[in-house]
Structure formats: C-alpha cells, structure tokens
C-alpha cells in the first residue's frame, strides 16, 4: 500500500485515516510487484494518488456526529501558468462508542479472576498535513499524519482502559520531471520516508494483574516501539 509512490510500511495501518477528500485516483497492480517495490508487494500494489494544485477547487468542510465526533478539513488549491500549489489539512476526533461491558476473556479463562465491568474507552483522533508545490519541471511534495487512539480490548481479549497507540507517518520528496517531446521522459527524485509506532499494551488490567503477583492497581503492560526510516534517490527514463 502506497501514497504517491511512498510505501505505507505500517503494520497497523487504518484505512479510515486516509485523506479521502484529497484522493485523485487509486492505481491497482495485480500480481507480484516485488521486482519494483520489494518483498512487501508479493501479491500486488495499491497506490493512492492525491490531488495536485488546480485539479479541483479549494474546499472547506466541517462534519460532526454522535459521541462528540468532529471532522473538519481544508484544501487550498491554486494554479497559474507553470505554478501550482496544494495545501491540505484534516482533523478527526471522537470519544468513540460508549457502553458498559460485563464480561471479557478473563471471565472465561480458568484461573483468572473476572475483570470488573467497565466502560469502553475507544477515543480516537488523527490529523493529516499535506503540501504539494510545482513550478515547471520541479516539484516538492510532503505528507505527515499522526494517530492517537485508545483501544478498549487488549491483545489478550480482556477489557482495558489503558491501551494507547501513537502512530506517525511522513514522507518528503524533491523531484524533477522532463518530457522528451513525444519520445519519452526523464525523472529524478530524492525522498525520505518515516514511520514510528509507540504502543502501550495492557495484557491484563489491575483486577487480574494481582493474580500474577503484580501490585494492586497495576496492570500488566508491554511497551513495544518501532521506527522505520528510508532515504533514497532515483533516476528513471524511458524513450521510444
């Protein structure tokens, strides 16, 4: 899965955080694409292409819903002669579904005390910033997104009020494209891709953790952290 040719090497990618209001088209390549895109493209490639300056008019939108949900976005699109620019920003914030659950996996597991009934904590927020500026054959493109979420059910299937996720994804690209009349093209680009996952998993809440010798009011946690970053440069050309 890619955005503008940049790999979303994010194992916890959430499709509802993609900038839908700024998508121009989606390209799908079926079959193994690993020769061009690496081993992660063994079954196929989905490349999400976002809009450029002047493709559509500027927009301002505000949506709202239940559970204190808000979703605004703004898009500034401009084009004149050989210059074009697009600035895009969105924000999403919700308290999530609100209910009380009386039973979880700890209740059905031998040797584990039932977890106390608790309200679901499924609040979620994310924001996206995108810039694309082009002048004649030179362009600059950048993208940044951050997700903060509280997941109500832990990896062990027990209810938890302390499963936190912080995900960040970004890329920047500087490029040059030259058309060789009707015979082909020459493309040069340098790029930087970045991704980080900062997770706090609560395997068992405080009600169950005491059975494993943990102090009272302390759950059993794991705190994995991952970071990926790639620098690269490419020169591609075709001629007929």
Image (tube, grey):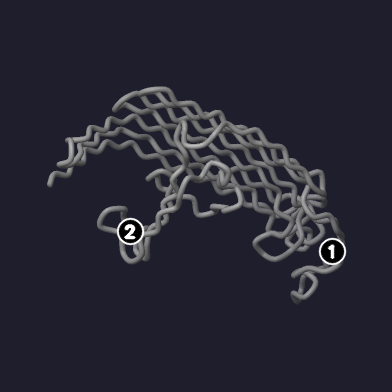
Give the structural element (helix, strand or loop) at label 2: helix
Residue 157 figure quarter: bottom right
Out of 158 and 176, give the one closest to the viewer: 176
Residue 108: where, in percent of width, then height?
A: 77, 75
Q: Residue at x 66, y 37 (%)?
A: 91
Left or right, 105 with reference to 99: left
Name the N-terminal-most of marks 2 and 1: 2
Q: Which residue is mark 1?
A: 101
Disc 2 vs disc 1: Cβ atoms closer than 8 Å?
Answer: no
Image: 127 above or below 26? above
Position of residue 217 in the picture relative to residue 35 (left or right):
right
Within 10 Å of the Cα at label 2, are there few (<14), some (14-19), or many (20+) other Cα atoms?
A: few
x and y, in percent, of residue 33 in the image: 30, 60
Mark sitting on residue 39: 2
Residue 39 is situated, as x and y percent measured from the top left of the image, at: 33, 58
Q: Is residue 204 above or below residue 85?
A: below
Quadrant into which the N terminus falls: bottom left
Looking at the rendered structure, the secondary structure element under dot 1 is strand
Whether 118 is drawn above or below 58: the answer is: below
Q: Position of residue 23 (x, y in %)?
A: 51, 45
Residue at point 38% right, 23% down? 81
CA separation in Å, label 2 and label 1: 42 Å
Name of the residue lying farthest toward the left? 240
């Amino acid at each position: 899965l890619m955005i503008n040719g940049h790999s979303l090497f994010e194992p916890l990618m959430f499709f509802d955080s993609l900038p839908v209001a700024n998508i121009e088209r989606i390209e799908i390549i079926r079959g193994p694409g690993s020769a061009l895109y690496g081993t992660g493209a063994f079954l196929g490639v989905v490349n999400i292409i976002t809009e450029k300056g002047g493709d559509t008019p500027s927009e301002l939108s505000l949506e709202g819903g239940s559970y204190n949900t808000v979703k605004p976005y703004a898009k500034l699109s401009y084009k004149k002669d050989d210059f074009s620019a697009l600035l895009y920003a969105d924000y999403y914030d919700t308290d999530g579904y609100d209910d009380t659950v009386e039973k979880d996996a700890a209740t059905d597991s031998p040797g584990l005390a039932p977890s106390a009934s608790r309200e679901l904590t499924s609040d979620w927020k994310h924001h996206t910033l995108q810039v694309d500026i082009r002048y004649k054959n030179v362009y600059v493109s950048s993208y940044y997104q951050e997700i903060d979420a509280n997941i109500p059910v832990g990896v062990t299937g027990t209810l938890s009020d302390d499963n936190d996720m912080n995900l960040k994804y970004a890329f920047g690209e500087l490029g040059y494209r030259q058309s060789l009349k009707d015979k082909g093209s020459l493309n040069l680009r340098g790029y930087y891709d970045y991704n980080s996952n900062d997770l706090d998993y609560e395997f068992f809440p405080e009600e169950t953790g005491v059975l494993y010798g943990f102090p009272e009011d302390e759950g059993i946690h794991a705190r994995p952290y991952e970071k990926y970053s790639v620098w690269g440069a490419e020169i591609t050309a075709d001629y007929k």
